[in-house]
Amino acid sequence: MEEKIVATEEKTSEKLDITTTRKIMVVGCGDGGCNIAATIADAIPNNVFAITYNLSNRAMNMRTAHTRIWPIGVDGSGKVRSDATETFKKSTARRFMERAMEVLGKMDHCDYILVVGTADGGTGSGTVPTMAKLLADNVDIPVIIMGVYPSIGEDAMSQYNAIQWQQDVTKTGLPYIILDNDVPGTLTDVHAAVNGYAVEIARILTGEAYGNTDISIIDNRNLYMLINQVGGRIVISTNKGRLDVNSDMTNFIETKLLANDYQPAPSNVRGIGLFVKGPKDMIDRVDSSLVDFQSKYGQALLKFAHLEISNEPSVSILLSGCSEPSDRLRIMQSKYNDVTNATTNRVDVSKEMAASMANPLGAMKTGGKRGDTLNFSALEG
């Protein structure tokens, strides 16, 4: 009898477990930066490790942080960027790096480092560019800068510092994100809203906002390419709503995302990451080509799409390679010029008045003063 050989295939029920979340180290510099870092750490405790750095230790223990650093014998920067930079370079940089390396050693892995500070003050504005470059030069982890522009209502020094910050950040060559306080509302409300949006951005970076999908996924490598390879200015916008039946994707991004994201508008976009999750009927009508969007904001060198079926609809977009926000910078320069010109052209009124007036009593006589020698002229004649 002929022997038959039957080929068999070994099968397994094990599924590949894809990790979609990422861990980041957030470094907050200055009062504003420490507040943002603490807000992010509170909201995303499992995937964020926070370090706070300030030139004053006041209220440092009131903010969430795993490591706190401040120089000895210094209390604030007084909005002087150069002082903050020199203090970090000469007094704190080496100790900071030692602590940062300790933190990275304790983390099982770290996907991104986010260095955060306001652009208008002293500590954050003066320290963030140098600190971020120092980290990038010493660790093989992508470093992202996040700064906050001042409102146009802030003083000339704030506008000046922000423009100097932008120059220094651009010079580092690192990817960066700009948030903007120039929106209506009380100072407290604006800060809370901007800090909250920083959390939404961090959710995208950590992968907590979107999960696994077998339709189309932006994986870790795709995100790395958008952020670190394309780099430049990054705009990340998100809206927790669903697309209407007749909604145009470009219009939805403009009106629901970019118009409400507390960031300067994107320009010259070179990288696009589109994230969409929602019911199947919503996902089925998503046009991820974004042809119209690219014709307005820039043709992408890289474009990825994440499409995920979910009962919790949300749309987000990550735009990288954007140029500096020139229009917003010109507004800050105009405010600075208005203030400084007004100061330069100020008339010293009292000096002008005094120069045009004379003593109505004439030259004043001085009496009671005796000369060195006696005068006997009165006896003559």
Image (tube, grey):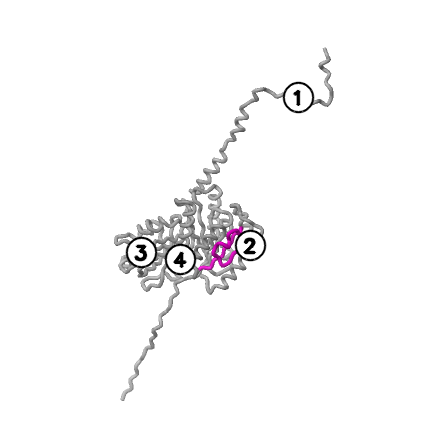
- Between disc 2 and disc 4, whose residue precedes? 2
Nearer the observer, disc 1 or disc 3? 1
Residue occupying the point 52% across, 27% down: 352
Q: In the rendered structure, which segment of residues is drawn in magenta?
A: 48-68
Which residue matches tag 4? Answer: 203
Which residue matches tag 3? Answer: 289
Q: Are marks 1 and 3 in contact (CB under 8 Å)?
A: no
Give the position of the N terminus as an image quadrant.
bottom left
- Between disc 1 and disc 3, whose residue precedes? 3
Element assignment for label 3: loop
* Residue 324 seen: no
Q: Is residue 9 highlighted in magenta? A: no
Q: Counting other residues with Cα less than 10 Å from the Cα at mark 2, is it few (<14), some (14-19), or many (20 or more)?
A: some
Q: CA distance from mark 1 to mark 3?
A: 96 Å
Q: Mark 2: which amino acid?
A: Thr
Which residue matches tag 1? Answer: 367
Residue 142 versus residue 267 in the image, above or below: below
